[in-house]
Amino acid sequence: MPKAAIFTMKLEPELRDEFMAAAEASHRPASQVVRELMREFVQRQQGETDYRVFVQQKVDTARSSVRNDDGRPDAVVEAAFAERRARVTDRT
């Protein structure tokens, strides 16, 4: 991948020195380490965004179910799961 952009940032001299020493100790150029960190950050942010979208879709589906009166009362759900628990317990 061609490198066409330059990224300039300000940081504390001590942090820069420690980072440069750590990059050198890992036998990698500092720019490579920064690119890896940036990729990891972007990937993590995308994962968080995807998760928020997933949760929002579940919430929207649940709210729609409630609005359409498609839900089941708590007592019915509890009874169904009590029955399932009893079946599983009986197998052991």
Image: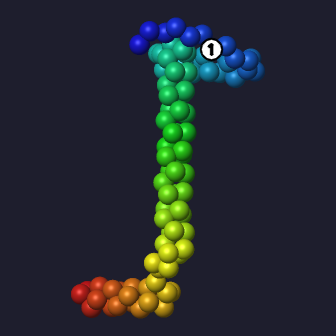
Q: Left or right: 80 with respect to 20?
A: left
Q: Position of residue 60 (x, y in %)?
A: 53, 62
Amino acid marked by disc 1? Phe
Residue displayed at 54% across by 69% down: 63
Residue displayed at 33% across by 86% down: 84
Q: How many marks?
A: 1
Q: Position of residue 59 (x, y in %)?
A: 54, 63
19 lies above or below 75:
above
Q: Which residue is mark 1?
A: 7
Q: Nearer the viewer, residue 62 or 13?
A: 62
Where on the picture, by quarter, is residue 30? top right
Query: From this viewpoint, is residue 26 visible?
Result: yes
Q: Position of residue 25 (x, y in %)?
A: 52, 19
In the displayed orientation, state which residue is furthest to the front.
68
Q: Pointer 1: residues within 10 angstroms few (<14), some, or many (20+)?
A: few
Q: Label 1, secondary structure: give it.
A: loop
Query: From this viewpoint, is residue 25 visible?
Result: no
Q: Nearer the viewer, residue 82 or 18?
A: 82
Residue displayed at 38% across by 88% down: 80
- Report the quarter where the N terminus lies: top left
13 lies above or below 59:
above
